[in-house]
C-alpha cells in the first residue's frame, strides 16, 4: 500500500502531470456547469467570466507548490 501511495506522490510532484489532471478536471466540470447556467438562462458573458475564474483557480492550485502547514504557529508559555 505504501508503494502505491509513494508512486502517486511522485506523479503529483511533476507540474506537467498536475496541469494535465487540472485540465481534465476542468473539462469534466465545464460541461456540467455550462448546462446548469444554460438551464437558468444566465447570460453567456457571465458564464464565460465564471468559467475563466474557475479555470484560473484550478490552474493556480495545480501550479503552486503543494506544501501543507508552511507557517508554524508556536504558543509561548508565560511561566
Image (cartoon, rainbow, N blue to C red):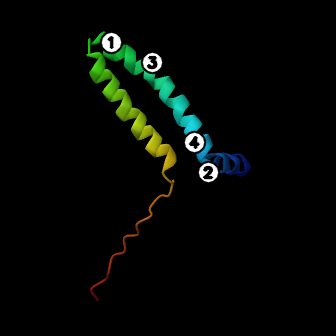
Label 3 crowd bin: few (<14), some (14–19), many (20+), radius 10 Å: few
Query: In 3D space, how far apart are the residues under numbered discs 2 and 4 (Cα atoms)?
Result: 8 Å
Q: Quadrant of residue 39?
A: top left
- Which residue position holds label 4? 18
Q: Earlier in the sequence, mark 4 or mark 1?
A: 4
- Could you tell me which residue is drawn at 57 percent across and 35 percent down? 21
* 19 relative position to 46: left or right: right
Residue contact between numbered discs 3 and 4, judged by CB atoms under 8 Å: no
- Which residue position holds label 3? 31
Looking at the image, residue 25 lies above or below residue 13? above
- Could you tell me which residue is drawn at 44 percent across and 38 percent down? 58
Q: Earlier in the sequence, mark 1 or mark 3?
A: 3
Asked which secondary structure carries label 3, the reply is: helix
Q: Earlier in the sequence, mark 3 or mark 4?
A: 4
Q: Earlier in the sequence, mark 2 or mark 1?
A: 2
Q: Residue 7: image x %, image y %? A: 70, 47
Residue contact between numbered discs 2 and 1, judged by CB atoms under 8 Å: no
Asked which secondary structure carries label 2, the reply is: loop
Looking at the image, residue 50 lies above or below residue 9? above
Q: Residue 69: image x %, image y %? A: 44, 61
- Which residue position holds label 1? 38
Query: In 3D space, how far apart are the residues under numbered discs 4 and 1 (Cα atoms)?
Result: 30 Å
Image mark count: 4
* The C terminus: image quadrant: bottom left
- Which residue position holds label 2? 13
- Could you tell me which residue is drawn at 35 percent across and 34 percent down? 53
Asked which secondary structure carries label 4, the reply is: helix
Asked which secondary structure carries label 1, the reply is: helix
Q: Earlier in the sequence, mark 2 or mark 3?
A: 2
Amino acid at each position: 500500500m505504501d508503494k502505491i501511495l509513494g508512486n502517486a506522490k511522485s506523479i503529483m510532484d511533476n507540474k506537467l502531470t498536475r496541469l494535465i489532471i487540472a485540465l481534465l478536471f476542468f473539462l469534466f466540470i465545464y460541461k456540467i456547469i455550462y448546462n446548469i447556467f444554460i438551464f437558468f438562462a444566465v447570460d453567456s458573458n457571465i458564464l464565460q467570466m465564471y468559467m475563466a475564474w474557475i479555470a484560473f483557480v484550478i490552474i493556480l492550485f495545480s501550479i503552486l507548490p503543494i506544501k501543507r502547514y508552511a507557517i508554524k504557529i508556536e504558543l509561548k508559555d508565560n511561566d
